[in-house]
Image: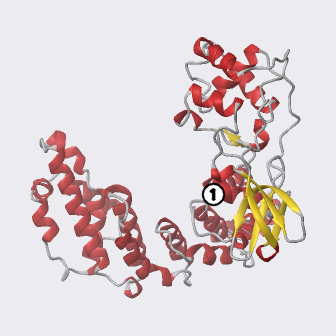
Amino acid sequence: MQSRDRFLKFAVGNAFYHSRLFVDLMKNAEALAEGDLSQAATDDRLGIVISFARAPIASLSKTEGMTETEITNAEESVRTLSLRLLQGMKYSTLTKDQQLTYLRGMSLVFLRLGPPEESERNAFLEQLDGSFPGADDELNRELCQALVYLKSPTVIGKAVGLMTAESRPTVTEDLQDLLARNRGYGGAIAASAANAPDQQQVWYAFCLRNAKEGWTLDQRKAYFAWFERAHRWAGGASFHGFLKNIEEECFLNASEKDRLLIEASGARKPYAPPELPKPAGPGHDWTLDEVRMLAESGLKDRNFENGQKMFAATRCVICHRFGGSGGATGPDLTQLAGRFTVKDLTEAIMDPSKVVSDQYRASTVVTTAGLSVTGRIIAENATSVTVLTNPEDPTKIVELAKSEIDEIQPSTVSIMPADLLKPLNQEEVLDLLAYLLSRGDKGNGMFRR
């Protein structure tokens, strides 16, 4: 397993997994977990970690008749041994190749044998946090990815700092050699290479998209501002699409309140809907009982596209995301069907003030000077309160100093209007309800084939 030939190592691993030795070790897992391998060479210990993390232990239920309990015990024992071997090494003293193998082994153990406990996470952070960033780009890439997974309290600030540094276009040596052969046909490629992406910075952006916690607003601003610069780089046909996907995933991984702050602060352009369609009508002054009666037998053979159209026509799309599109001032409704029954949904639409979540409740903030500001409080710290005054425009915010606030009065009335369904006819109401309950799945049984 110490060979530098990856194909040979892979073949040796497969031979081991099909050997009697592997089966016997898994059947005697408790003894394996207690084994002392501390005196083994570093490369041997790293090889053992990689081999066991990749081991097809679950397949032994079919090939050897091991019970589910025996399989679980074997996996737990392998995990215990692997983590003990890794934690017994000092990362900073390893060679570069050993450090890369260490990070890969740790990742495999957590991905295949179970995520880290809090104590394990802290132990690895103590080993790794101080090593990022280092002088080696390859190690920095692996460390950034690992530290984001381990929820390092420092990796966001460090990686954002590297993203905002001066860019270094990544042009490989083989490309430079190719251009040197003929400056004639290589002119266009050379021009593109001069404006090549900084692949290291792109990788940091890619890793940070999965960081859900620990951001400051300034870090969010710097992160999203980087994309404007990155879009000026020359890349392949899919490059700009990949950038958009990275940016979108990072935004979606933020909490709903953070999404609103991101857009309100100008860190990212808020959702701008296309021209809203109009319902066919004629409308009706719907009551809750009428809508519920319609829904009892009407949620079949519905029209997905018309439901999507009504989601926009009733202005829901301005405040709510659904299926990856929409505003951020209200909750994301994509998974609404997992929380709401038809009864709950119709009540939330027809009588939004009956139950108002504290997270989306409006308040009236009265200042000592007699000024009243009404809206949703989206941020509060030791010195100020930030109020969103228009739920349809996340840039309409007012920041008030706490020293100037006389009182804050919670509202009992929802900021969501209660007459959204009035412009719709019966078919449009039913299509909208089916759309909201579909989780964005056009193939849902509620829709006609």
Asked if residue 225 can be seen in this view, the reply is: no
Q: Identify the residue shown where x is 57% and y is 65%.
A: 213
Could you tell me which quadrant the C terminus lies in?
top right
Residue at (53% x, 80% y) in the render: 132
Residue under the image location 27 percent in, 62 percent down: 51
Please tell me whether residue 365 is drawn above or below residue 97 in the rendered image.
Answer: above
Depth order, front residue of 425/306: 425
Relative height, residue 73 to residue 151 (above, below): above
Q: Which residue occupies the foreground of this view, 198 or 265? A: 265
Looking at the picture, how far across and down is residue 380, in whole percent?
70, 68
Residue 298 found in image quarter: top right
Whether 313 is drawn above or below 429: the answer is: below
- What kind of colouring is applied to the model shown? secondary structure
Residue 256 as seen in the image, left or right of residue 100: right
Dot 1, how many residues are within 10 Å of its Cα: few (below 14), some (14-19), or many (20+)?
some
Q: Position of residue 212 (x, y in %)?
A: 57, 61
Question: In which image quadrant can residue 435 be found?
Answer: top right
The residue tagged with tag 1: helix, strand or loop? loop
Q: Which residue is mark 1?
A: 254
Quadrant for the N terminus in the image:
bottom left
Q: Amino acid at mark 1?
A: Ala
Q: How many marks?
A: 1
Q: Nearer the viewer, residue 332 or 135?
A: 332
- Whether residue 156 can be seen here: yes
